[in-house]
Amino acid sequence: MGLQEEILSKSAQIKTDSYSMSIGELVNLYRDRDLDIHPEFQRVYRWTDYQKTRLIESVLLGIPIPPIFVAQRQDGVWDVVDGVQRLSTILQFMGELLNEKRTPVQPLILQKTKFLPSLEGKKWKAEKKNDPNAFTREQQLYVKRAKIDVNIVLKESDEKSKYELFMRLNTGGSDLSAQEVRNCLMIMAYPETYKWIQKLADVHEFRGSISISDQAILEQYHMELATRFVVFRKLPEAELSNVGDIGEFLNESLEKIHGLTANERQAEEDAFNETFRVVYHELLDDAFRRYDKDKKRFLGAFSISSFETVALGLGYNVQADGKLPRLQSLQHKIQSIWTNKKFTDYSGSGIRASTRIPKIVPLGRELFSK
């Protein structure tokens, strides 16, 4: 198939439309549940109150707001693909935003800005009569009548189009981590898979053994590690060489995870729980740190290379009954990887995951097989 045929084929799979809509109209759609911004996303996006205030300032000054992208579901509801934070900010300021439990989020109180310093302390509506901090009727109308362009991926489009669109709009210049984008993809495409990965990532022994920073937790790195475990645990060795870009590989693996049967999912969960039960009870949070043979102790921060060798090696060897075989001196085996030439050659800084994984994952599988 030539380039022109490819263009015609793929463009035919995506049907779009666009409107210019007032903020008031978008709020009504949200209120009627005809616009879904996925409240689960709210924990992912981290705008400060000042950044939110700047958006409201832009609306008041007539500065154009970037367009939002939505995907029309089969039931006609619009899923917001890009523009979640902008819409959430407007809804929060107007007192309309709901959380995952469908209870109101605390309304936004504005801060002063360079151009509108009098925004300091302003809010959408009065809590008491003649409240000087409340927006006037005229100011509320400025906001309600402001227009935002809405680009729509219609329901006739290929089902995967909105997820591809989300990835393209939220990678590259995005301030989200790769896993935060991946979480959003799962929430839109495979919500039950998202909840399952989240459940794994919250297992006490897992969280206790990985010992990553609070910032990494905030950026959902623990969920990425849980996703890596499920993706790579039983991946055939021949396929380990096809990883390429690790982020893209994990994204492309979401559909496969979603397709696991109930029995397969339970087997993965059992293997996950058993692996980190053993690791945590044997070494607490030392298992995935560097071992210094001279000082005879584990040092430093979390090592992804150690995780891929130890956790995936142990996970691979979990038996059909959900248990690991009796291992001789787990701690000694983990220490030994730090003097193993294959591990040290392929685990240094600057080694790409596509180069590292085909070498050290099989090493771990062999090391923890007996």
Image (cartoon, helix red, strand yellow):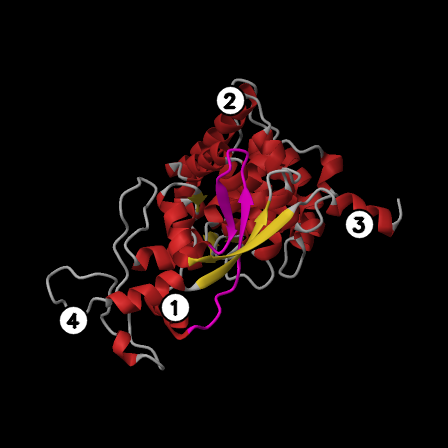
Tell me the distance, in whole angstroms, between the alpha carbons under discs 1 and 4. 23 Å
Query: Is residue 234 toward the left or the right of residue 27 in the image?
Result: right
- Numbered range of the magenta stretch: 62-83
Tell me the distance, in whole angstroms, between the alpha carbons under discs 2 and 1. 48 Å
Is tag 2's residue or tag 3's residue first in the polypeptide sequence?
3
Residue 270 falls inside the magenta stretch: no
Question: In the image, residue 177 lies at what x, y percent?
Answer: 51, 56
Is tag 4's residue or tag 2's residue first in the polypeptide sequence?
4
SS class, disc 3? helix
Query: Is residue 266 toward the left or the right of residue 134 in the image?
Result: right
Position of the C terminus by quadrant: top right
Which amino acid type is shown beneath numbered disc 3? Ile
Question: Which is in the foreground here, disc 1 or disc 4?
Answer: 4
Tell me the distance, in whole angstroms, between the alpha carbons under discs 4 and 2. 64 Å
Query: Image height check: is 266 above or below 285?
Result: above
> Residue sitting at 60 percent across and 31 percent down?
316
Between 140 and 176, the one nearer to me in the picture: 140
Is tag 4's residue or tag 3's residue first in the polypeptide sequence?
3
Which residue is under mark 4? 132
Is tag 1's residue or tag 4's residue first in the polypeptide sequence?
1
Q: Which mark is residue 51?
A: 1
Which residue is under mark 2? 322
